[in-house]
Image (spheres, rainbow, N blue to C red):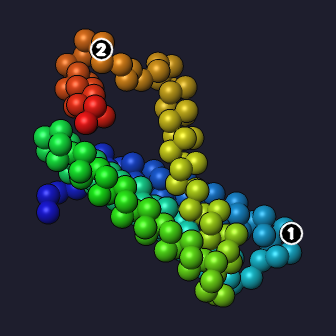
Amino acid sequence: MSKVDSTIKAETKNIAIAVLILSALLEAVYLILGLWNYTVLLGNLLGGAAGILNFFLMGLGLQSALKKDAKDAKTTAKFSYTYRYIILGVVIVIGIFVPIFDMVATIASLFFSSLGVYVRFFVTKRNNNVAPSITSDSSDETTEGTDNMTKEVSEE
């Protein structure tokens, strides 16, 4: 297995921080409403950990796909997507049917990593005050290869 890219490590750390903050807020809401018990904490931990793992595995899948030709990259991306969502489905089933996990806390926590991605995107965009370019008309050599590869993968 190849070395994990430092960008994946850094972004996963950022997402983990966002999940931690949002998890603390969820716990506080349960406390304020008087609904808190140990199942909320366990569900929050399960869902949050699964969300962070999903993000990390997505990064690894993309890192692996970018090292391959277009056809193999598409297969790798599909494989990664399928198995990551099977894992999330299993977590949801566990959160619903295993009584030591609060169902709402488990499922809500799964979305915290996605919220972290969106918040990070908008904060970064606002701080840079520049929208990222995703078009293939870009003259930037570093994005041109990626854009062409993305086009090739999506056309197949």
How far apart are labels 2 and 1 at the CA level? 51 Å
Left or right? Give the position of 107 relative to 78: right
Residue, x 62% and y 71% (percent of image)?
Answer: 106
- Amino acid of disc 1: Leu
**Position in image of residue 131 (x %, y %):** 47, 21
The amino acid type, in three-letter code, at marker 2 is Ser
Residue 1's image quarter? bottom left
What is the quadrant of the C terminus in the image? Answer: top left
Direction from residue 22 to residue 82 in the image, left or right: left
Can you give x and y, in whole percent of width and height, for residue 28 in the image?
75, 66
Percent coordinates x, y for residue 58 in the rendering: 35, 54
Task: Say whether residue 128 is left or right of residue 62.
Answer: right
Kindly identify which residue carries mark 1: 33
Left or right: where 11 falls relative to 112: left
Place residue 26 in its image quadrant.
bottom right
The residue at the far bottom in this view is 99
Near-viewer residue (142 or 84): 84
- Res. 13 visible in picture: no
Who's the residue at 21% across and 45% down the image?
Answer: 73
Q: Where is residue 38 in the image (x, y as percent from the top left)?
A: 69, 84
- Furthest residue to the front? 156
Q: Please tell me whether mark 2 or mark 1 is closer to you in this view.
A: 2
Residue holding disc 2? 138
Q: Are marks 2 and 1 in contact (CB under 8 Å)?
A: no
Question: Residue visible at 30% across and 34% down?
Answer: 154
Front-most of 23 and 61? 61
For label 2, count other residues whose C-alpha is less than 10 Å away and answer few (under 14), some (14-19) or many (20+). Answer: few
